[in-house]
Amino acid sequence: MRRCVLSLLLVLSAVCAQAAPPWQTLPPTPAAIPTSQIGDAPLDGIRIHYAVYGNGAPVILLHGGLANADYWGDQIPALARHHMVIVMDSRGHGRSTADARPYGYDLMTDDVIALLDLLKLPKVDVVGWSDGAIIGLDMALRYPARTGRVFAFAANTDTSGVKPNVGKNPVFAAYIARAGHEYAALSPTPHGYKAFVTQISKMWAQQPHWTDATLRTIKSPVLVVDGDHDEAINRTHTEHMAATIPGARLLILPNVSHFAFLQNSAAFNAAILGFLSD
């Protein structure tokens, strides 16, 4: 009898562990998806790792801070059925290199434009997550002729939009730790993660800092998106972004967080495809 009770408790514990709500989980980073169109582009003294999938109207996927292009592995197959999909590792992230210049969103935006020049793509739609979404908005501001629709997930347009002590959130802390292991496995400077985080954190503390007047100059169609349990971004900030950017729409995805594209990829992909096909 005692053994049966113990077995039942173990089963119940396993069920409870599996029943954790999606926003409290950090699903595995997808494996890199093979493609014949892959390379390390020499751009402005650095090398940017990129890959291209599918055919059709081009869309570039821009990952979040500390991450790499592999995080889009659940989105690439869904989008590549209808679009040419370009992914890249931002400078200093993943397999890409960096130089001595301080990290800044303007610098990373210029890298995206340089890659589009190399690929001979005059204009693309943008799907961005966190830092990638900020870059997408910066593209709309500074390179409007090159920027189509912008799917801006978990972005902030001012440092005040970030929740304090986000790094202490268990899911976000797990992500930072995972990103360190991935950096060691992928980066040309595998032992440099600590210095890398310090530099990126300095950027986060100071950027972006766009006024409402600046945001009102955006002409690209923008969908402002976030998860209803985002660990990093204040909901009021997300709502303000959508209300300030001309014509922008707001979408709050249920039961997911800053990592919605992993936690519920089907809903995330449907939102992207619906927006791009409007």
Image: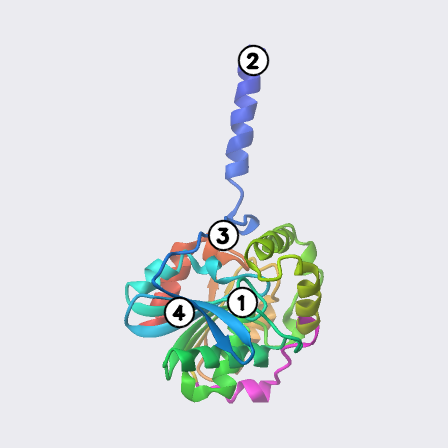
Q: Which residue is mark 1?
A: 96
Residue 233 on image: x %, y %: 60, 66
Q: Assign a secondary structure to mark 4.
A: strand
Which label sits on residue 29?
3
Q: Residue at x 56, y 78 (%)?
A: 45
Is 18 in the magenta?
no
Residue 242 visible in the picture: no
Q: Disc 1 marks which amino acid? A: Ser
State which quadrant residue 193 falls in: bottom right
Depth-wise, is mark 3 or mark 2 nearer the camera?
A: 3
Residue 255 versus residue 169: which sits nearer the camera? 169
Which label sits on residue 86?
4
Mark 1 or mark 4: which comes first in sequence?
4
Mark 4 or mark 3: which comes first in sequence?
3
Residue 34 on image: x %, y %: 37, 57
Q: Assign a secondary structure to mark 3.
A: loop
Cα–Cα gap, marks 3 and 2? 38 Å
Residue 122 versus residue 206: which sits nearer the camera? 122
